Amino acid sequence: MDVAHGDPRPAARPSDACRTRVVLDIVGDKWSLLVVRNLRNGPRRFTELKKAIDGISQRMLTVTLRSLERDGILTRTVHEVMPPHVSYELTEMGRTLREATAPLLEWSVAHLARIDDARAAYDARTDTPVSS
Amino acid sequence: MDVAHGDPRPAARPSDACRTRVVLDIVGDKWSLLVVRNLRNGPRRFTELKKAIDGISQRMLTVTLRSLERDGILTRTVHEVMPPHVSYELTEMGRTLREATAPLLEWSVAHLARIDDARAAYDARTDTPVSS
DNA sequence: CGGTATCCCTCCAGATACTG
DNA sequence: CAGTATCTGGAGGGATACCG
């Protein structure tokens, strides 16, 4: 996120690995995929997202939404009523992004237990054993 | 990455969104997916990876490899020869992770131009127009 | 309601030097 | 060759206060 200000990468470097970074800057963000995921069933309002994404601060939700809007992943629509009403919705590109990340989410659900096991085993090998 | 030291998330919160964070901590890392990607054709040595992944520092390559090893994504094998020889290879779980991220990489290649366009359009709308 | 602005602190990650 | 150790700047992000 916030790639605009100081991205030092030369434009003349079209390798796959390099370009991948742009996408990782989107999905690797702490909150972006959670926001995308919460928009999977249609438009949501700011406060709805804030409640749905546990632990996100108002500031980070704003920052994340702006970034995704800038990247063309979602749209921001202001309804001029009282009280003010802003809704966010995935664009077509946002929907394809969500589809592209679906396998990853499935993988996570399928392998989280094994990751925990692997970590525990690794830590058991490397940590100083507490009790004799 | 480096989730061990101070992860404040309660264990008793098995919602999808919450658990997703663990995987995002892996793939969202700046270098992890690049390492995984570079191991797609079999084992690679430390220096090979360092050369293949442009811009990674020795420290970050070490940190990234350790983290992926801890998570059970790859294995580290020391060959006791002279000179020392260490090779890294994806585990079965690592290979499935790579497969799960493939759609995302394809998506990135397919949409990078549109992301650039979206950003340029957004910046044109929001930036202070330089000339009149 | 849906933001902005500001302060401030943590931790990431690059640079550099040293080692088995 | 393949690391580890240490220092350090700066970005990420929480808390808080205020605004249209």
Image: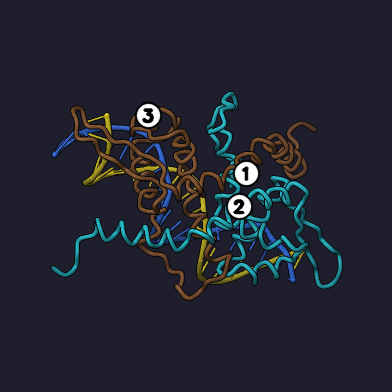
Chain colours: A brown, B cyan, C yellow, D blue
- Give the image location of residue A68, x and y in percent: 40, 48
The subunit letter for the residue under badge 1 reads A
Q: Which residue is mark 2?
A: B103
Query: In the rendered structure, which amino acid carries the disc numbered 2?
Result: Pro
Residue A128, visible in the rendered structure = no
Cα–Cα span, label 1 and label 3: 26 Å
- Give the image location of residue D14, x and y in percent: 39, 36
Q: Is residue A124 left or right of residue A96?
A: right
- Give the image location of residue C5, x and y in percent: 21, 46
Residue sitting nearer the eye, A82 or B46: A82
Residue sitting nearer the eye, A90 or B27: A90
Quick check: B99 above or below A11?
A: above
Q: Which residue is mark 3?
A: A48
- Name the residue at the front extreme: A92
Q: Residue at x 42, y 49 (%)?
A: A73
Quarter containing the C terminus of chain B:
bottom left
Q: Which residue is mark 1?
A: A103
- Name the residue at the bottom extreme: A12
